Amino acid sequence: MKIIYAKDYDSMSRKAANIISAQVILKPNSVLGLATGSSPIGIYKQLIEWYEKGDLDFSACHTVNLDEYVGLDKTNDQSYAYFMYHNFFKDININMENTNVPNGTNTDAAGECARYNKVIQDLGGIDIQLLGIGHNGHIGFNEPGIAFEKETHCVELTQKTIDANTRFFNSKEEVPTHAYTMGIKNIMNAKKILLVACGAEKAEILYRMVTGKIEPSVPASILQLHNDVTIVADEAALTVINEKAPYLIERLPSCNKK
């Protein structure tokens, strides 16, 4: 496991984007595992910038996203399909037929999960999987539990998540209560994993993930068993690691441009 220091969010985004861009350049038909949320937005902006400069070509790439809310279609501005299109796909030359997000409108949970597992399998697996990490150590919607979920599954969202999402909808009744998410096995089968973290609120869980016991109560801790994991985190997120295990951190030169 490699931990790369970044001064701030912008530096984290550039360094992480460099890793993804290298993957695309070295293997133009890469299968990219993508994530949503605030953490990867800067990465996508940087990749778009390099694409616009002519440095990157996504025309042969395929993508698979980690998760999607059940009940939301791709036109809903709170769906992850909508997020990916408006924050990344529409600004690069990727073939939209090569992009994959779980189908939130499919009410057959078992069927949708099986379909999505087959999508990943038929693509030959994921070359690099981008991840964020939740405050409680969740990756995707794999929340702390008593066992590691294996493959794509339907998860009931916690009340805390539902309450936090209420502000994005017109009424509480519209807030999704379930989501489809890749499981730990899907994630661990990726050839490379790139996890990004930003902010002091991630410092303790990042330390536990890297140095603590591997257990379902910290889902991201399973990444200790993967043979190719790179963590790019800003100074604030690395506070506890820097204090207790500074030898784990690689301090690469500043990355102002590709």
Image (cartoon, helix red, strand yellow):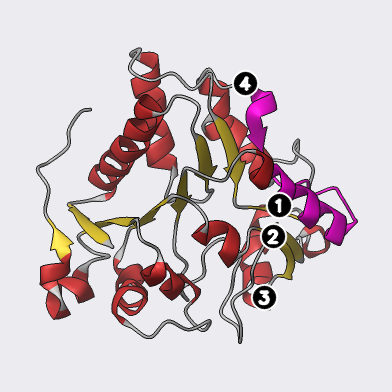
Which amino acid lies under the numbered mark 3 shown in the image of this protein? Thr
**Looking at the image, is mark 1 or mark 3 earlier in the sequence?**
1
Q: Is 66 placed left or right of 253 in the picture? A: right
| Label 3 sits on residue | 158
Image coordinates for residue 102, horizontal then vertical, percent: 72, 47
Helix, strand or loop at label 1? It is helix
**Looking at the image, is mark 3 or mark 2 earlier in the sequence?**
2
Give the CA distance from mark 4 to mark 3.
Answer: 35 Å
Image coordinates for residue 112, horizontal then vertical, percent: 82, 52
Give the CA distance from mark 2 to mark 1.
Answer: 6 Å
Which amino acid lies under the numbered mark 4 shown in the image of this protein? Asn
Give the CA distance from mark 1 to mark 3.
Answer: 24 Å
Q: What stretch is highlighted in magenta?
A: 96-119
Q: Nearer the viewer, residue 247 or 185?
A: 185
| Label 4 sits on residue | 95
Marker disc for residue 117: 1
Marker disc for residue 152: 2
Helix, strand or loop at label 3? It is loop
Q: Which residue is drawn at 67% across and 38% down?
A: 100
